[in-house]
Image (spheres, helix red, strand yellow):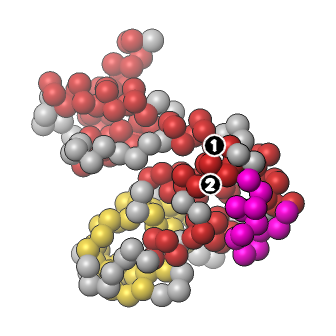
Amino acid sequence: MIGKLKGKIDACFNDYVIIDVSGVGYLVYCSSKTLNKLVVNEFCQLFIETHVREDHINLYGFLSLEEKFVFNLLQSVNGIGTRMALAILSNLSPEQIQSAIAKRDKEAFKAVSGVGLKLAERIIIELKDKALTNLANNLPLDKNDSDLANDATLVLTSLGVNRTEAHNLVQEIIANNPELSINELIKLALKARSSNV
């Protein structure tokens, strides 16, 4: 499973980019908001959501973890797949989506091509209890943290650990054991958490 790609943008198209990572070109689908921020021949980092099907593997790329979480959140709504989720993110930022759900703003979603009144209502109804909780627990990673700390925090949150708790556990362990591998770090964090419960 691919979680993140760092490399140079080889080419940009209407709904995807090709990113060169150590000589291998990955085709990654993105929202138009993300595509507009990517520049050919410049380096970037994309958080990746991998979708495996019987006849293909698709990669979806995001500049922030928050956008990736909202992409998955939208797909939990009946009738929304990857293409529609990207269309919504092409028109609305994660913050605007959260606000529209909280305010029951159907017009914000109806402004997206392909979203009618019924789907707009369904998004609000099905996500009104999920959105605030999920977005709050999946805040963007701390830019001041090391890659090791951020990766470990991401793994812990994917295992169900609260974002703040995961961050604090990782920072405490790294402070005392700076030479740990990510596997050792995660094991110690889970052990420390279980002993505190």
Q: Residue at x 63, y 71 (%)?
A: 87
Secondary structure of the residue carrying numbered label 2 = helix
Residue type at tag 2: Ile
Q: Is residue 82 visible?
A: no
Locate the N terminus and report the quarter of the image it occupies: bottom left
Q: Position of residue 64 (x, y in %)?
A: 42, 57
**Decide: marks 2, 1 in contact (CB < 8 A)?**
yes
Q: Residue at x 12, y 36 (%)?
A: 179
Q: Is residue 102 magenta?
A: no
Q: Name the image quarter holding residue 83.
A: bottom right
Q: Residue at x 66, y 40 (%)?
A: 130
| Relative side of 7 to 54, left or right | left
Residue 186 position (above or below residue 38): above
Q: Which residue is mark 1?
A: 131
Residue type at tag 1: Ala
Q: Which residue is mark 2?
A: 97
Residue 83 position (above or below residue 103): below
Q: Residue at x 54, y 52 (%)?
A: 95
Q: Position of residue 173 (x, y in %)?
A: 23, 26
Pick the front one: 155 or 181: 155
Q: Position of residue 38 (x, y in %)?
A: 37, 76
Residue 22 position (above or below residue 97): below
Pick the front one: 111 or 184: 111
Secondary structure of the residue carrying numbered label 1 = helix
Q: Is residue 111 magenta?
A: yes
Spatial separation of the CA atoms under disc 2 and disc 1: 9 Å
| Relative side of 148 to 14, left or right | left
Q: Name the image quarter holding residue 120.
A: bottom right
Residue 191 position (above or below residue 50): above
Q: Local crowd at mark 2 within 10 Å, few (<14), some, or many (≥20)? A: many
Residue 102 — which label?
A: none
User: Start and end of the magenta stretch?
Assistant: 105-117
